[in-house]
Image (cartoon, rainbow, N blue to C red):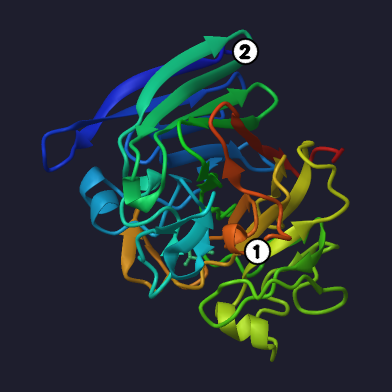
Amino acid sequence: MQNLPSTRQSHYGYLADGTEINRVTLQNSNGVEVEIISYGGIITRLLTADKNGKFNDIVLGLDNIDSYVKSNPYFGALIGRYGNRIAKGKFTLAGKNYQLDTNDGENHLHGGVQGFDKKVWDMAPFVTEHSAGVVMTLVSPDGDQGYPGTLTSEVVYELTNEDELDMRFSATTDKATIVNMTQHSYFNLAGKGSILDHQLMINSKQITPVDKGLIPTGEFSDITNGPFDFSQLKAIGKDINANDQQMKFGLGYDHNYVLFDKEAGAMSLAARVVEPTSGRILEVHTEEPAVQFYSGNFLDGTLTGKGQTYQHRSGLCLEPQHHPDSPNHSHFPTTTLLPGDTYKTRISYRFLTTQQKLA
Ligand code: BGC
């Protein structure tokens, strides 16, 4: 008999000011397990089966709350209010100029110095017949990190018996503001080593090229047959050292891929990762118009966790989102949220193996 989906709550640690950080563990009937903490809504552990049914942790993570507070390159975190960069932290909305934190050189990255990845979320676990989940909620006050409006956000993590981690994001505001939330897990489907032999498919024919500060120039460039082309499964390491200006700016892949033939707001396959040795496959589905592919270029062997040292390119991120710096490019899909409207988006990670038939 199969186990029923379940949730477990446990103590994770304390912040320096005494705030308790909790952990919720979700398990489905097949033994897939996801651990989430209230700090940053971080996925600290994610166990999935390989082609022989052996379970392993496939996300990068640190060992305790102090390490997450001290220095986390967004491992596993919920990102908000605005994922990715905003040039010089500046934007104009409804005739008003706003200045956000600048925490990435002169630019704003992933919501600022105290983005959603560093906030303490409320967690309410739940189980259904076919899933185990947790509802994460956070109220970000007017002016938080420079953003206008009180933003009330919710993220529902739901692990289903179809081996899918479904994430539903929503938010409302009391003033015109901007929102672009995402999830920032670093995956290594082999559980260790480099990700250069992982094979990747991204359902895209264009990227938004960037300048040397990784801010979009505003163009869309065709990537067909070039080093950025992942329209067919290709090893990540194959072209990563190509003599290409964009690759140099990113120090590898750190680019926003426009999803191909996307019906606005509809759920579709953004990317598929196949790790040949373990036979693990990850699919990322989303309602978002784009996905940031980041090949772990800034990992440099200074962080350790789970008994490993995280070397250059030991994890990869596929972050569904709107384009970077959208508030400053009026031809990009809008990231504006108005009072009375509800921001809604969805991301789903599906875990498969090469033993299964792909849809
Ligand atoms: C960005 C990288 C950044 C990294 C931080 C990614 O989402 O695209 O440029 O360095 O996050 O971990």
- The reply to whether residue 120 is visible in this rendering is yes
Residue corresponding to mark 1:
329
Residue, far front = 95
Left or right: 191, with 271 as reference point: left
| Residue at 80 percent of width and 71 percent of height | 229
**Left-right relation of 12 to 235:** left
**SS of the residue at dot 1?**
loop
Residue beneath disc 2:
2
* Screen quadrant of the N terminus: top right
Which element is circle 2 on? loop
Which marked residue is nearer to the observer: mark 2 or mark 1?
1
Q: Of the residues shown, which amino acid type is indicated by label 2?
A: Gln
Q: Position of residue 351 (x, y in %)?
A: 67, 38
Tell which circle, 2 or 1, labels the residue nearer the N-terminal end.
Answer: 2
Q: Residue at x 40, y 48 (%)?
A: 147
Q: Nearer the viewer, residue 230 or 190?
A: 230
Label 1 environment density (alpha carbons within 10 Å; few <14, some 14–19, many ≥20): some
The furthest residue to the bottom: 243
Q: Residues within 10 Å of mark 2 (few under 14, many from 20)?
A: few
Q: Position of residue 262 (x, y in %)?
A: 84, 47
Q: Amino acid at mark 1?
A: His
Q: Quadrant of residue 310?
A: bottom left
Q: Residue at x 59, y 29 (%)?
A: 342
Gap in Å between the C-alphas at discs 2 and 1?
Answer: 51 Å
The vertical placement of 71 against 15, above or below, is: below
